[in-house]
Image (cartoon, rainbow, N blue to C red):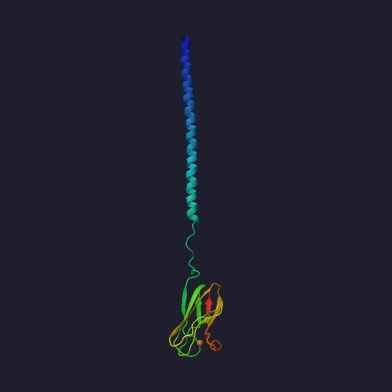
Amino acid sequence: MLNRFGFRTLLLLMLVVLSLGLLAAGCGDDDDDDSNGSGDTTEATTDATTDATTDDAEEPDEPADGAAQSFDVPVAAEGLAFAVTEVTASPGTITLTSVNDQAVPHNIAIDEPTQQIGEIVQDGGTSTITITIDEPGEYEFYCSVPGHREAGMVGKLIVQ
Ligand SMILES: [Cu+2]
């Protein structure tokens, strides 16, 4: 009788101890899982924030390089001269359009940074050159009809 009672008590005790051990182990695992989960979430959030911040905002409000610009540089009503003798442009592609209402033939041309020579026109014709200038500076445009440039048929193209 005593032995049987003692055996049952021992069994009960072992069961209790086992159960407590399993519970403890289970709690420990749960804690670890929670920690890992939190870590992953934090990393993902940080990555998203970094990406958004790294994306460059729009370009500053400067004239876009290479933007097309057009200027009218008509020939004077009479004489060997342009009516407009100074043009200010931004670096990029620049078009100069010269209407010549004279009966005397004229055109518009430029030597630097690359030579461009417009068509020689008269009686309301239009002479045009298009040039790309990236380097700020002063460039001279002129009429390439012989003797006209020397007579002062020139103008200044300022790139800044
Ligand atoms: Cu001319």
Pick whichever, 105 or 7, lies toward us.
105
Pick whichever, 31 or 95, lies toward us.
95
The residue positioned 47% from the left and 21% from the top of the image is 15
Pick whichever, 78 or 129, lies toward us.
129
Percent x, y for residue 66? 50, 70
| Residue 157 sits above or below residue 12 on the image | below
Where's the N terminus, which quadrant?
A: top left
The residue positioned 50% from the left and 73% from the top of the image is 93
| Residue with the most extreme left position | 124
| Residue with the most extreme top position | 1
- For the image, the number of numbered tags is 0
Percent x, y for residue 54? 50, 56
Percent x, y for residue 99? 45, 84
Percent x, y for residue 62? 49, 68
The residue positioned 48% from the left and 10% from the top of the image is 3
| Residue with the most extreme front position | 119
Pick whichever, 79 or 88, lies toward us.
79
